[in-house]
């Protein structure tokens, strides 16, 4: 009985063991089925995702869920840096851990990335199989991790990263757990590679669209540049000027445009208020050979080789694309071409004008067939737009030697503006202009040219000559006037002989006594004529007796107060400086000339009114 009982118990134990094995196997199969179902669902979910970040987040979340760990994370390899870096985490709380980078072979993850094999550690902190580093250990410690499993993310033979599952307690990862995470990693690697390829394709499409847009913009820029080139070329061939360039470029670039010469003088302006080009901007453009931005505007130096001719200033266009900048610079080249062409034409015309002026100034009586035949001279002048039938004045210009070439250019430009001629004669610049009164013109020219040239310019003038044959003698008179201005220390001033007082009378070829008398004594003579007074007679007596009031009143047979009253009236008419040495000399000479002209006694009849 006892033996039978033992056999029965053995049968029961064996049946129990078999039943337990079967239960365990069924449980494993059910778990495996659940894991496979989860993997299938994961694969389906990953296949549906197109965004790389979404794919990565889904992978680590499924890894954490499938293995029931505290945390899951994923690193991607950086082929440029030669390491693997933390890309996404699920369940992490440490910022330092989330920013880890692992060198190949460093830590558990670096070893997986290097060998393409899975590794697990029940307690990483004490596991000496791995190469520990300060940064990795600090991140693991801060995150509180102990049990860690890492499997490679592989596409073919290429490892693209590592997938991890980890617990904050010690844990032995079973072969089934390792196999499960590896299976998930295989699906994940395919999804990652697909999402990356899709992202790269999208990026390539974006780049392609950008390239197409750039090509279209470049094509449009080329079309605009070709159109601008044709229009500017046509402008040059039509004989256009800088005004035409300004209008064309302002229209093409949609801003205001101003063109200045090398001195900053405005030559043309469209769509902007008067502006002054920045000297620093012009210098920078000249040095670099490109248009430069200056305070929201653009400046382009106008150059002929290395010679600075002027500048272009574009306003209202703070931002200028490369194509528009090139177009603006092309306008600078066209402007330089026009300025050089116009300068060449002007220089040729100035030479012709100078030759005509030289013939007009040549002394000697005219003769048939000679270069000074007035008929041929007048014909040549008319061809140049100069009318010699009008009275012309002659002006001589003089300055220091250094800026004389500049003076020549400025004088020629002003001569053209006045409808006259300019040229060099006997070392001086000569200007012939239709002006009935050369004095004011001489003063204005001296002031203008002094500012333009930068040094004092002295202008001696004479005229007007009422016929071409009288121009040589008028020129000689202008020379004497220029010499007199220098002798009087009036460098930088301008005058005619009539403006030099009695010196003009002495130096002039035509003794204009009545004109001189009228200029000096005119107000007093007119007052005597209107009022019947004797101011002239009083002045004569006053100076004849050495400016003595007592002797003058005796000569005039009037009270001394009458003399004083008359002289006060003279001061009102001639100005308070009438009795200064210079003015009194002029007045005394005019009184003597007036007396000679009247052919009468020095004082005339006595008894006039004050």
Image (spheres, grey):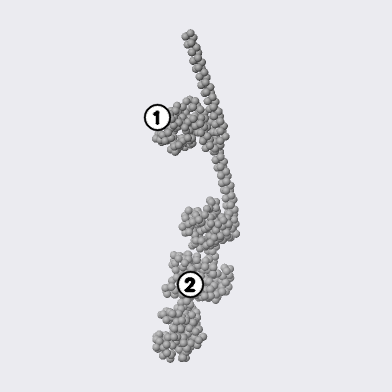
Residue 291, percent from left and from top? 50, 54
Q: Residues within 10 Å of mark 1 (few under 14, many from 20)?
A: few
Query: How many numbered tags mark residues here?
Result: 2
Residue 536, percent from left and from top? 46, 86
Q: Secondary structure at mark 2?
A: helix
Distance of label 2 from label 1 (alpha carbons): 105 Å
Q: Residues within 10 Å of mark 2 (few under 14, many from 20)?
A: some
Residue 406, percent from left and from top? 48, 64
CB atoms of marks 2 and 1 within 8 Å: no
**Comparing labels 2 and 1, the label whose residue is closer to the camera:** 1
Q: Is residue 559 left or right of residue 190?
A: left
| Disc on res. 424 | none
Residue 241, percent from left and from top? 56, 61
Q: Nearer the viewer, residue 188 or 548?
A: 188
Q: Residue at x 47, y 74 (%)?
A: 495
| Disc on res. 443 | 2
Label whose residue precedes the other's in the sequence (2 or 1)? 1
Q: Nearer the viewer, residue 573 or 460?
A: 573
Q: Residue at x 47, y 79 (%)?
A: 505
Q: Nearer the viewer, residue 61 or 497?
A: 61
Q: Which residue is mark 1?
A: 126
Q: Secondary structure at mark 1?
A: helix
Q: Is residue 298 above or below residue 375?
A: above
Observer able to see residue 409: yes
Observer able to see residue 344: no
Q: Is residue 386 left or right of residue 3?
A: right
Q: Residue at x 58, y 70 (%)?
A: 382
Q: Is residue 495 above or below residue 588?
A: above
- Name which quarter of the figure residue 345 lies in: bottom right
């Amino acid at each position: 009985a006892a033996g039978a009982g033992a056999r029965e118990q053995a049968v029961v134990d064996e049946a129990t063991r078999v039943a337990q094995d079967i239960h365990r196997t069924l449980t494993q199969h059910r778990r495996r089925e659940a894991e496979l179902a989860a993997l299938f669902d994961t694969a389906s979910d990953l296949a549906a995702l197109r965004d790389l970040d979404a794919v990565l987040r889904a992978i680590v979340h499924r890894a954490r869920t499938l293995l029931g760990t505290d945390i899951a994370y994923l690193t991607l390899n950086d082929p440029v840096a030669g390491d693997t870096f933390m890309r996404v985490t699920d369940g992490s709380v440490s910022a330092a851990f989330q920013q880890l980078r692992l060198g190949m072979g460093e830590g558990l993850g670096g070893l997986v990335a290097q060998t393409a094999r899975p590794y697990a550690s029940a307690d990483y902190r004490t596991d000496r199989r791995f190469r520990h580093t300060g940064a990795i250990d600090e991140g693991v410690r801060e995150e509180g991790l102990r049990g860690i499993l890492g499997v490679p993310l592989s596409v073919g033979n290429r490892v693209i990263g590592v997938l991890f599952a980890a617990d904050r307690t010690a844990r032995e990862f079973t072969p089934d757990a390792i196999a499960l995470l590896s299976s998930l990693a295989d699906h994940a690697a395919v999804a990652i590679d697909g999402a990356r390829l899709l992202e790269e394709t999208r990026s390539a499409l974006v780049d392609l669209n950008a390239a197409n847009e750039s090509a279209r913009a470049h094509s449009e820029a080329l079309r605009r540049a070709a159109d601008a080139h044709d229009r500017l070329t046509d402008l040059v061939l039509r004989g256009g000027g800088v005004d035409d360039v300004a209008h064309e470029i302002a229209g093409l670039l949609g801003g205001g445009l101003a063109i200045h010469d090398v001195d900053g003088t405005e030559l043309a302006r469209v769509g902007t208020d008067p502006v002054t080009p920045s000297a620093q901007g012009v210098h920078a453009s000249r040095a670099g050979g490109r248009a430069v931005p200056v305070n929201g505007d653009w400046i382009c130096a106008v150059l002929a080789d290395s010679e600075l001719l002027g500048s272009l200033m574009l306003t209202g266009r703070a931002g200028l694309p490369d194509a528009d900048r090139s177009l603006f610079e092309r306008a600078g080249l066209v402007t330089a071409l026009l300025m050089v062409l116009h300068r060449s034409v002007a220089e040729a015309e100035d030479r012709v004008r100078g030759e005509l002026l030289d013939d007009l100034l040549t002394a000697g009586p005219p003769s048939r067939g000679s270069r000074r035949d007035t008929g041929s001279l007048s014909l040549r002048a008319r061809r140049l737009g100069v009318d010699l039938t009008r009275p012309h004045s002659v002006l001589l210009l003089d300055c220091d030697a250094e800026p004389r070439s500049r003076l020549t250019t400025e004088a020629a430009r002003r001569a053209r503006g006045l409808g006259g001629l300019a040229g060099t004669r006997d070392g001086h610049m000569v200007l012939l202009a239709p002006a009935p009164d050369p004095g004011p013109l001489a003063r204005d020219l001296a002031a203008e040219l002094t500012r333009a040239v930068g040094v004092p310019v002295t202008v001696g003038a004479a005229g007007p000559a009422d016929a071409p044959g009288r121009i040589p003698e008028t020129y000689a008179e202008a020379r004497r006037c220029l010499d007199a201005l220098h002798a009087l220390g009036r460098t930088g001033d301008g005058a005619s002989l009539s403006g030099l007082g009695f010196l003009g009378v002495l130096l002039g070829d035509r003794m204009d006594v009545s004109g001189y008398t009228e200029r000096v004594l005119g107000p007093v003579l007119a007052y005597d004529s209107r009022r019947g007074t004797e101011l002239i007679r009083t002045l004569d007596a006053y100076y004849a007796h050495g400016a003595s009031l007592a002797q003058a009143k005796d000569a005039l047979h009037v009270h001394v107060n009458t003399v004083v009253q008359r002289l006060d009236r003279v001061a009102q008419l001639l100005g308070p400086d009438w009795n200064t040495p210079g003015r009194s000399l002029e007045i005394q000479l005019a009184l003597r000339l007036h007396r000679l002209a009247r052919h009468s006694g020095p004082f005339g009849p006595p008894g006039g009114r004050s």
